[in-house]
Image (cartoon, grey):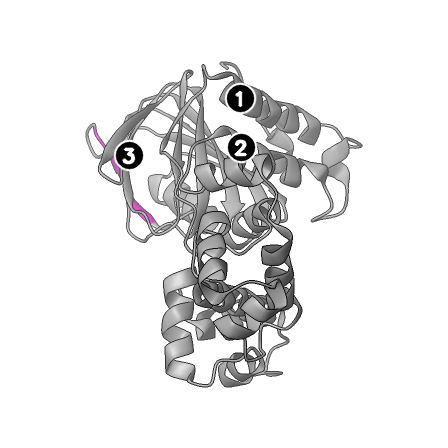
Amino acid sequence: MTGEDVLQRYDVLESAELDEFRATVARFLTPHRLRPTGHEGAYLRGNVAVASLGALSLVYGSHSGTELDVTLTEQVDYYDVNLAWEGHNRITCGGQEIIVDAQTAGIISPQMRATMRLSDSYRQLHVRMERYALERHLEELLGRPVVAPIRFHPAMDLRNPSAATWARAVRLLVDDLETLDGLAAQPAGETPWTSFLMTGLLLGQPHNYTEQLTRQRAAPRPGGLRRAMDLVEEAPEADLSVERLALAAGMSPRSLQRQFRAYAGVAPREYVLQVRLARAHDDLRNARPGAVTVADVALRWGFTHVPRFAAAYRQRYGELPSATLNAL
Protein backbone atom coordinates (compact mmCIF):
# COMPACT_ATOMS: atom_id res chain seq x y z
CA MET A 1 0.00 0.00 0.00
CA THR A 2 2.84 2.36 -0.80
CA GLY A 3 2.55 5.43 -2.97
CA GLU A 4 1.23 8.95 -2.64
CA ASP A 5 -1.11 10.25 0.03
CA VAL A 6 -4.73 9.12 -0.26
CA LEU A 7 -7.98 11.09 0.09
CA GLN A 8 -6.27 14.11 -1.42
CA ARG A 9 -9.66 15.68 -2.19
CA TYR A 10 -10.24 15.76 1.58
CA ASP A 11 -6.94 17.31 2.73
CA VAL A 12 -7.25 19.52 5.80
CA LEU A 13 -3.54 20.02 6.55
CA GLU A 14 -0.11 19.83 4.99
CA SER A 15 2.46 21.25 7.35
CA ALA A 16 5.99 21.01 8.73
CA GLU A 17 4.88 22.27 12.16
CA LEU A 18 4.68 19.49 14.76
CA ASP A 19 2.19 21.31 17.00
CA GLU A 20 -0.08 22.13 14.07
CA PHE A 21 0.00 18.49 12.95
CA ARG A 22 -0.84 17.28 16.48
CA ALA A 23 -3.66 19.78 16.96
CA THR A 24 -5.25 18.91 13.61
CA VAL A 25 -5.20 15.16 14.28
CA ALA A 26 -6.65 15.78 17.76
CA ARG A 27 -9.60 17.66 16.23
CA PHE A 28 -10.76 14.52 14.46
CA LEU A 29 -9.49 11.81 16.81
CA THR A 30 -8.40 11.96 20.47
CA PRO A 31 -6.29 14.57 22.32
CA HIS A 32 -2.73 13.36 22.69
CA ARG A 33 0.89 14.24 23.30
CA LEU A 34 3.22 13.96 20.32
CA ARG A 35 7.00 13.76 20.64
CA PRO A 36 9.65 13.12 17.97
CA THR A 37 12.06 10.39 19.03
CA GLY A 38 14.96 12.19 17.38
CA HIS A 39 16.28 15.63 18.29
CA GLU A 40 13.76 18.37 19.02
CA GLY A 41 14.54 20.23 15.80
CA ALA A 42 13.82 17.22 13.60
CA TYR A 43 12.14 18.07 10.30
CA LEU A 44 8.55 16.87 10.02
CA ARG A 45 6.26 16.86 7.03
CA GLY A 46 2.71 16.01 8.05
CA ASN A 47 -0.46 15.51 6.06
CA VAL A 48 -4.03 15.00 7.33
CA ALA A 49 -7.18 14.26 5.32
CA VAL A 50 -10.67 13.59 6.68
CA ALA A 51 -13.72 12.16 4.92
CA SER A 52 -16.88 12.08 7.05
CA LEU A 53 -19.75 9.73 6.22
CA GLY A 54 -21.99 10.43 9.19
CA ALA A 55 -21.35 7.81 11.86
CA LEU A 56 -18.25 6.62 10.00
CA SER A 57 -15.20 8.74 9.19
CA LEU A 58 -11.91 8.06 7.49
CA VAL A 59 -9.01 10.01 8.99
CA TYR A 60 -5.78 9.70 7.04
CA GLY A 61 -2.47 10.84 8.46
CA SER A 62 1.07 10.67 7.18
CA HIS A 63 4.39 12.06 8.32
CA SER A 64 8.05 11.84 7.47
CA GLY A 65 11.28 13.07 8.98
CA THR A 66 11.28 11.27 12.33
CA GLU A 67 9.67 8.55 14.40
CA LEU A 68 6.89 9.83 16.66
CA ASP A 69 5.84 8.78 20.16
CA VAL A 70 2.11 9.30 20.81
CA THR A 71 0.34 9.16 24.17
CA LEU A 72 -3.44 9.53 24.25
CA THR A 73 -4.31 11.92 27.07
CA GLU A 74 -8.01 10.99 27.14
CA GLN A 75 -9.95 7.78 26.74
CA VAL A 76 -11.14 7.00 23.24
CA ASP A 77 -14.93 7.44 22.98
CA TYR A 78 -15.39 5.77 19.57
CA TYR A 79 -14.12 2.67 17.74
CA ASP A 80 -10.85 3.27 15.91
CA VAL A 81 -9.50 0.74 13.41
CA ASN A 82 -5.91 1.58 12.50
CA LEU A 83 -4.74 0.43 9.05
CA ALA A 84 -1.13 0.96 7.95
CA TRP A 85 -0.75 2.30 4.42
CA GLU A 86 3.05 2.35 4.72
CA GLY A 87 5.47 1.73 7.60
CA HIS A 88 4.37 0.46 11.00
CA ASN A 89 2.86 1.58 14.30
CA ARG A 90 3.54 -0.06 17.67
CA ILE A 91 0.34 0.29 19.75
CA THR A 92 0.18 -0.57 23.46
CA CYS A 93 -3.44 -0.75 24.57
CA GLY A 94 -5.36 -2.71 27.19
CA GLY A 95 -2.22 -4.49 28.34
CA GLN A 96 -1.41 -5.73 24.82
CA GLU A 97 1.07 -4.65 22.19
CA ILE A 98 0.10 -4.69 18.52
CA ILE A 99 2.35 -4.00 15.56
CA VAL A 100 0.16 -2.35 12.93
CA ASP A 101 1.59 -3.13 9.51
CA ALA A 102 0.61 -4.69 6.19
CA GLN A 103 -0.54 -7.89 7.94
CA THR A 104 -2.15 -6.54 11.11
CA ALA A 105 -4.61 -3.76 11.91
CA GLY A 106 -5.14 -2.40 15.43
CA ILE A 107 -8.51 -1.68 17.04
CA ILE A 108 -8.94 0.68 19.98
CA SER A 109 -12.32 0.38 21.70
CA PRO A 110 -14.07 3.04 23.85
CA GLN A 111 -12.82 3.80 27.36
CA MET A 112 -9.31 2.67 26.44
CA ARG A 113 -6.08 4.63 26.53
CA ALA A 114 -3.15 3.86 24.29
CA THR A 115 0.44 4.75 23.46
CA MET A 116 1.93 4.46 20.00
CA ARG A 117 5.26 4.67 18.25
CA LEU A 118 4.89 5.63 14.60
CA SER A 119 7.77 4.74 12.29
CA ASP A 120 9.38 7.37 10.09
CA SER A 121 7.58 7.77 6.73
CA TYR A 122 4.42 6.29 8.24
CA ARG A 123 1.04 6.52 6.55
CA GLN A 124 -2.07 5.35 8.38
CA LEU A 125 -5.83 5.32 7.85
CA HIS A 126 -8.11 5.49 10.88
CA VAL A 127 -11.59 4.06 10.34
CA ARG A 128 -13.56 5.87 13.02
CA MET A 129 -16.98 4.45 13.95
CA GLU A 130 -19.09 6.34 16.47
CA ARG A 131 -19.87 4.29 19.52
CA TYR A 132 -23.62 4.89 19.60
CA ALA A 133 -23.95 3.90 15.93
CA LEU A 134 -21.92 0.68 16.09
CA GLU A 135 -23.62 -0.46 19.29
CA ARG A 136 -27.04 0.32 17.81
CA HIS A 137 -26.04 -1.66 14.72
CA LEU A 138 -25.13 -4.62 16.92
CA GLU A 139 -28.48 -4.30 18.70
CA GLU A 140 -30.21 -4.61 15.33
CA LEU A 141 -28.22 -7.76 14.53
CA LEU A 142 -28.89 -9.26 17.97
CA GLY A 143 -32.50 -8.12 18.20
CA ARG A 144 -31.93 -6.81 21.71
CA PRO A 145 -30.01 -4.09 23.60
CA VAL A 146 -26.33 -4.50 24.30
CA VAL A 147 -25.49 -4.05 27.96
CA ALA A 148 -21.87 -2.96 27.79
CA PRO A 149 -19.48 -1.45 25.26
CA ILE A 150 -18.26 -3.73 22.50
CA ARG A 151 -14.69 -4.82 23.22
CA PHE A 152 -12.89 -5.93 20.08
CA HIS A 153 -9.77 -8.07 20.17
CA PRO A 154 -7.22 -5.30 19.53
CA ALA A 155 -5.19 -7.17 16.88
CA MET A 156 -6.94 -7.74 13.54
CA ASP A 157 -5.14 -10.39 11.48
CA LEU A 158 -5.44 -9.22 7.88
CA ARG A 159 -4.39 -12.66 6.65
CA ASN A 160 -7.71 -13.98 7.97
CA PRO A 161 -10.12 -14.16 4.99
CA SER A 162 -12.94 -12.19 6.62
CA ALA A 163 -10.59 -9.48 7.94
CA ALA A 164 -8.83 -9.30 4.58
CA THR A 165 -12.18 -8.83 2.83
CA TRP A 166 -13.08 -6.06 5.27
CA ALA A 167 -9.76 -4.27 4.68
CA ARG A 168 -10.23 -4.54 0.91
CA ALA A 169 -13.67 -2.98 1.31
CA VAL A 170 -12.09 -0.02 3.13
CA ARG A 171 -9.69 0.45 0.22
CA LEU A 172 -12.62 0.31 -2.19
CA LEU A 173 -14.29 3.05 -0.14
CA VAL A 174 -11.12 5.15 -0.36
CA ASP A 175 -11.16 4.74 -4.15
CA ASP A 176 -14.88 5.51 -4.24
CA LEU A 177 -14.34 8.75 -2.32
CA GLU A 178 -11.85 9.91 -4.95
CA THR A 179 -14.66 9.99 -7.54
CA LEU A 180 -17.42 12.58 -7.74
CA ASP A 181 -20.37 10.25 -8.36
CA GLY A 182 -19.62 7.03 -6.45
CA LEU A 183 -21.70 5.37 -3.76
CA ALA A 184 -20.08 7.60 -1.13
CA ALA A 185 -21.42 10.67 -2.93
CA GLN A 186 -24.87 10.09 -1.39
CA PRO A 187 -26.12 12.67 1.16
CA ALA A 188 -24.57 12.41 4.63
CA GLY A 189 -25.81 9.41 6.57
CA GLU A 190 -27.28 7.64 3.53
CA THR A 191 -24.18 5.97 2.13
CA PRO A 192 -24.35 2.16 2.11
CA TRP A 193 -20.69 1.96 3.07
CA THR A 194 -21.37 2.72 6.73
CA SER A 195 -23.76 -0.17 7.32
CA PHE A 196 -21.64 -2.57 5.26
CA LEU A 197 -18.41 -1.84 7.12
CA MET A 198 -20.09 -1.95 10.53
CA THR A 199 -21.69 -5.31 9.79
CA GLY A 200 -18.43 -6.67 8.41
CA LEU A 201 -16.43 -5.58 11.44
CA LEU A 202 -18.94 -7.08 13.88
CA LEU A 203 -19.03 -10.39 12.01
CA GLY A 204 -15.38 -10.61 11.04
CA GLN A 205 -13.46 -9.48 14.14
CA PRO A 206 -13.80 -11.25 17.54
CA HIS A 207 -15.36 -9.24 20.37
CA ASN A 208 -17.23 -9.80 23.61
CA TYR A 209 -20.55 -10.30 21.80
CA THR A 210 -19.29 -12.69 19.13
CA GLU A 211 -20.65 -15.81 20.84
CA GLN A 212 -24.09 -14.24 21.36
CA LEU A 213 -24.15 -12.98 17.78
CA THR A 214 -23.28 -16.43 16.44
CA ARG A 215 -25.96 -18.05 18.61
CA GLN A 216 -28.57 -15.48 17.56
CA ARG A 217 -27.89 -16.09 13.89
CA ALA A 218 -28.01 -19.87 14.37
CA ALA A 219 -31.06 -20.17 16.65
CA PRO A 220 -34.02 -17.72 16.53
CA ARG A 221 -35.60 -16.71 19.85
CA PRO A 222 -38.48 -18.85 21.12
CA GLY A 223 -41.94 -17.36 20.58
CA GLY A 224 -42.69 -16.74 24.26
CA LEU A 225 -39.43 -14.91 24.80
CA ARG A 226 -40.03 -12.87 21.67
CA ARG A 227 -43.44 -11.76 22.99
CA ALA A 228 -41.87 -10.63 26.26
CA MET A 229 -39.14 -8.71 24.43
CA ASP A 230 -41.71 -7.10 22.13
CA LEU A 231 -43.62 -5.89 25.19
CA VAL A 232 -40.46 -4.24 26.52
CA GLU A 233 -39.74 -2.62 23.15
CA GLU A 234 -43.30 -1.30 22.83
CA ALA A 235 -43.48 0.36 26.25
CA PRO A 236 -40.20 0.24 28.18
CA GLU A 237 -41.37 3.03 30.47
CA ALA A 238 -44.22 0.87 31.83
CA ASP A 239 -44.15 -1.19 35.03
CA LEU A 240 -42.51 -4.30 33.56
CA SER A 241 -42.08 -6.74 36.40
CA VAL A 242 -40.79 -10.25 35.77
CA GLU A 243 -44.26 -11.54 36.59
CA ARG A 244 -45.91 -9.35 33.94
CA LEU A 245 -43.36 -10.34 31.32
CA ALA A 246 -43.77 -14.02 32.21
CA LEU A 247 -47.53 -13.71 31.79
CA ALA A 248 -47.07 -12.19 28.33
CA ALA A 249 -44.62 -14.98 27.44
CA GLY A 250 -46.92 -17.73 28.73
CA MET A 251 -44.32 -19.26 31.03
CA SER A 252 -43.21 -19.20 34.64
CA PRO A 253 -40.98 -16.38 35.91
CA ARG A 254 -38.17 -18.89 36.44
CA SER A 255 -38.40 -20.17 32.85
CA LEU A 256 -38.45 -16.60 31.59
CA GLN A 257 -35.33 -15.76 33.59
CA ARG A 258 -33.60 -18.80 32.12
CA GLN A 259 -34.55 -17.95 28.53
CA PHE A 260 -33.52 -14.31 28.89
CA ARG A 261 -30.10 -15.36 30.12
CA ALA A 262 -29.73 -17.96 27.37
CA TYR A 263 -30.75 -15.73 24.45
CA ALA A 264 -30.19 -12.16 25.66
CA GLY A 265 -27.29 -12.75 28.03
CA VAL A 266 -28.96 -10.79 30.85
CA ALA A 267 -31.85 -11.07 33.30
CA PRO A 268 -35.22 -9.49 32.35
CA ARG A 269 -34.72 -6.58 34.76
CA GLU A 270 -31.37 -5.71 33.16
CA TYR A 271 -32.90 -6.00 29.69
CA VAL A 272 -35.62 -3.48 30.61
CA LEU A 273 -32.99 -1.13 32.07
CA GLN A 274 -30.89 -1.21 28.89
CA VAL A 275 -33.88 -0.55 26.61
CA ARG A 276 -34.83 2.43 28.77
CA LEU A 277 -31.27 3.76 28.70
CA ALA A 278 -31.14 3.39 24.91
CA ARG A 279 -34.38 5.35 24.48
CA ALA A 280 -33.15 8.04 26.87
CA HIS A 281 -29.86 8.22 24.98
CA ASP A 282 -31.69 8.76 21.69
CA ASP A 283 -33.83 11.53 23.19
CA LEU A 284 -30.84 13.30 24.71
CA ARG A 285 -28.84 13.14 21.47
CA ASN A 286 -31.72 14.44 19.36
CA ALA A 287 -33.13 17.08 21.73
CA ARG A 288 -33.27 20.70 20.62
CA PRO A 289 -31.25 23.04 22.85
CA GLY A 290 -33.30 24.08 25.87
CA ALA A 291 -36.28 21.89 24.92
CA VAL A 292 -35.88 19.27 27.65
CA THR A 293 -33.90 18.57 30.80
CA VAL A 294 -32.18 15.39 31.91
CA ALA A 295 -34.93 14.91 34.50
CA ASP A 296 -37.61 15.21 31.81
CA VAL A 297 -36.01 12.45 29.76
CA ALA A 298 -35.35 10.24 32.75
CA LEU A 299 -38.97 10.39 33.92
CA ARG A 300 -40.28 9.86 30.38
CA TRP A 301 -38.56 6.47 30.25
CA GLY A 302 -39.47 5.19 33.67
CA PHE A 303 -36.55 6.40 35.81
CA THR A 304 -37.99 7.88 38.99
CA HIS A 305 -34.61 8.55 40.65
CA VAL A 306 -32.55 10.91 38.48
CA PRO A 307 -29.15 10.41 40.24
CA ARG A 308 -29.45 6.62 39.83
CA PHE A 309 -30.42 7.16 36.19
CA ALA A 310 -27.33 9.35 35.70
CA ALA A 311 -25.06 6.71 37.28
CA ALA A 312 -26.48 3.90 35.12
CA TYR A 313 -26.26 6.10 32.02
CA ARG A 314 -22.64 6.96 32.68
CA GLN A 315 -21.75 3.31 33.20
CA ARG A 316 -23.44 2.43 29.89
CA TYR A 317 -22.33 5.34 27.68
CA GLY A 318 -19.16 6.58 29.38
CA GLU A 319 -20.50 10.08 30.03
CA LEU A 320 -23.17 11.83 32.08
CA PRO A 321 -26.56 12.39 30.41
CA SER A 322 -26.01 16.15 30.71
CA ALA A 323 -22.92 15.81 28.49
CA THR A 324 -24.96 14.05 25.80
CA LEU A 325 -27.73 16.65 26.05
CA ASN A 326 -25.33 19.57 25.73
CA ALA A 327 -23.11 18.11 23.00
CA LEU A 328 -22.98 20.19 19.84
Please report the residue visible at 60 percent of the width from the left and 71 percent of the height from the top: 283
Please report the residue visible at 38 percent of the width from the left and 67 percent of the height from the top: 314
Determine which residue is flagged by label 2. 203
Q: Is residue 172 left or right of residue 295?
A: right
Callout 2 crowding tier (Cα within 10 Å): few <14, some 14–19, many ≥20: some
Determine which residue is flagged by label 1. 162
Answer with mark 1 or mark 3, whichever residue precedes in sequence: 3
Q: Position of residue 148 (x, y in %)?
A: 41, 54
Answer with mark 2 or mark 3, whichever residue precedes in sequence: 3
Answer with mark 2 or mark 1, whichever residue precedes in sequence: 1
Please report the residue visible at 61 percent of the width from the left and 64 percent of the height from the top: 250
Q: Which sits in the foreground, 147 or 162? A: 147
Amino acid type at circle 2 is Leu
Q: Which sits in the foreground, 76 or 71? A: 76
Q: Identify the image quadrant of residue 310.
A: bottom left
Please report the residue visible at 69 percent of the width from the left and 49 percent of the height from the top: 189
Q: Which residues are magenta?
A: 32-37
Q: Is residue 79 left or right of residue 42?
A: right
Amino acid type at circle 3 is Met
Residue 70 visible to the viewer: no
Q: Secondary structure at mark 2?
A: helix
Q: Position of residue 113 (x, y in %)?
A: 29, 46
Magenta run includes residue 33: yes
